[in-house]
Amino acid sequence: MVDGNGKCTATVDRTGNLPGRGAWLHPDQQCLHAAIRRRAFVRALRITGSPDLSAVIEHVENLSAGSAHPAREQVAKNMSTP
C-alpha cells in the first residue's frame, strides 16, 4: 500500500484477496530477518526504497510466540506501486 507521501507499507494478506503485488515468506523469524537483510521485499514487490514492514514483523512474531510450527502463508500481499 502506498500512502499520500509515497511511503510503501507491507501488510499481511491472510485470505490472499487483497489487490496489488505480493511476496511469499515462510512465517519464521529467521526467514523474515534474512529477507529484510537481503532486501527481498524490495525485489519481490518491485519497489524503490524500503517498505514499512512493522505489520509483517508483528505478525511473524505473534505466530512464533503462539506456535512452534506455523503454517506457510502469504505475507506482504497488499503492495500497490505508484
Image (cartoon, rainbow, N blue to C red):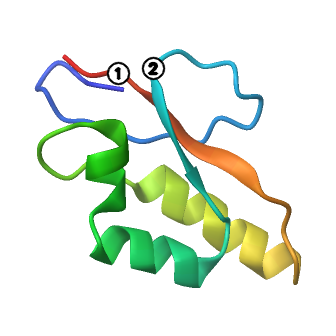
Note whether 55 is above or below 70 in the view shown.
above
Mark 1 neighbour density, 10 Å: few (under 14) some (14–19) many (20 or more): some
Closer to the chain start, of discs 2 and 1, is 2
Classify mark 2: residues with Cα within 10 Å, few (<14), some (14-19) or many (20+): few
Vertical comparison of 74 with 3: above or below: below
Q: Is residue 52 visible?
A: no
Q: How far apart are the alpha carbons under marks 2 and 1?
A: 5 Å
Q: Is residue 18 above or below residue 71?
A: above
How far across and down, in percent of the image, does residue 55 sit? 50, 51
Residue indicated by mark 2: 20
- Amino acid type at mark 2: Gly
For disc 1, the marked residue is 80
Residue located at (18% from left, 35% from top): 7
Q: Amino acid at mark 1?
A: Ser
At 18% from the left and 16% from the top, the residue drawn is 82
| 2 and 1 marks in contact (CB < 8 Å) | yes
- Residue 9 placed where, x, y %? 34, 39
Q: State the residue at coordinates (51%, 64%).
A: 57
